[in-house]
Amino acid sequence: MEMEGVNILPGKVTDVTLTFGKPGIYTFFCTRWCGLNHWRMRGTIEVSGSNLEPQPASVPLYISLNLDIDAPHEAPSIPSTRPSAVIGQRFATDLAISLSTDYYRSNSPYQVFDELKSASLTEQQRWDVVAYLWQSNATKVSLAHGQKLYTQNCAACHGENGAGDGVFADDLAVAGEASMQTMTGADEMMMQTPVDFTDPKRMLGASPALLQGKILRGGMGTGMPMWGSIFTEEQIWDLIAYLYSFQFIYHN
C-alpha cells in the first residue's frame, strides 16, 4: 500500500485513517529532510487478520546470485566519453546480445562490455552498445519514477547530480570525524562520505542486482539507511535505472 504524504506540523496532531488490503508489516516515514538523523524518523504498523490473504515473500536477486555486496567492484576499464544508447543501437542489431531483463539485472555494464570484445567494434562503440542495453531496460516512465525517488530520498546526501555532494555531505564527514574520537583505532569504521554515482569505475563495475542489495540493506558503517522496508521492489528497480543515467546518455 502506498499513500501520499501527510503534513504534520510541530506541536500539532494529525489524524489519518488507513485501510489495509493484506497482512504484513508496513513502514511509515518522514519525507521532510531535517538533518543527518532524518532517516531514523520511521516506524512500522503490523497488520494481521484471518480474512486477509498473506503474500509470499520473494528472494532478492542479489541473494539468488550469491553476491557479496561489500566486495570491491570497480570496472577495470572505463569509456573515454559518456556512452550513448542512440549510437549503440546502430551496432546492437547485428550482435548476438540479449536485451532481456534477467541479463541486464545480473551483469554489470563492464561485464557486458567485456563479453563484446570479440565483436568488430571499437571500445567506445562497445560501451555505446552497453548503454543501449541499459536503455532498453529503462522506460521513460521508470526513469521518471526513479528520478522522483532519488530527489526525495537520496539527493540530500548524494547530490542532485549524483556527485556525492549533497547538502548533508559535509555534515556526514563531520559526524564521521566525531565518531572517530570515541572509537579506538577503528579507522575503517569512520562514517563514509556519500557515494559518487558519476564515478564510472564504481558504477560500471556494479550490476543492477548488486545495487539492489546495497539499497535494500543500506550501507554498513556508513550513513546510508536500509531502504528495504520503505521502497517496493518496483521502486528499487526504477531507482537503479535512474542511477545509471548518470553514466549513460539514454535519449536525444
Image: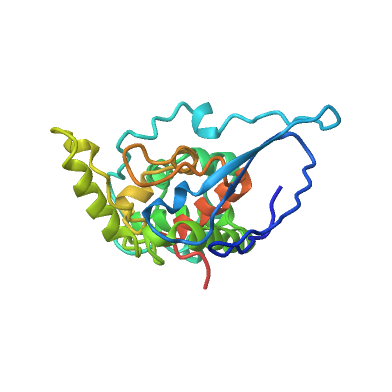
Q: Nearer the viewer, residue 82 or 244?
A: 244
Compare residues 219 and 174 and report the one nearer the observer: 174
Q: In this picture, is 59 found above or below 31?
A: above
- Most extreme residue toward the left is 185
Residue lying furthest bottom in this view?
A: 252
Position of residue 201 measured from the top left corner of the image (x, y, whole percent) = 30, 50
Expressed as whole percent of the image width and height from the top left, the position of residue 99 reads 58, 47
Q: Is residue 56 left or right of residue 227?
A: right
Q: How many marks?
A: 0
Q: State the image coordinates of residue 115 (x, y, percent, origin top left).
A: 42, 41
**Residue 172 shows in the view:** yes
Image quadrant in which you'd find residue 179 = top left
Q: Which percent across, then down, holds residue 178?
A: 20, 47
Q: Residue at x 37, y 49 (%)?
A: 204
How does the figure colour the protein chain or chains?
A: rainbow
Q: Extreme front residue here?
A: 11
Q: Is residue 173 above or below residue 249?
A: above
Residue farthest along the right direction in this orientation: 51
170 to 214, vertically: above or below: below
Please tell me which residue lies in front, 59 or 201. Answer: 59
Residue 96 visible in the displayed image: no
Residue at image x 79%, y 47%? 19
- Residue at (39, 46) in percent of width and height: 224
Left or right: where does residue 20 sit relative to residue 14?
right
* The one of 19 and 165 positioned closer to us in this rendering: 19
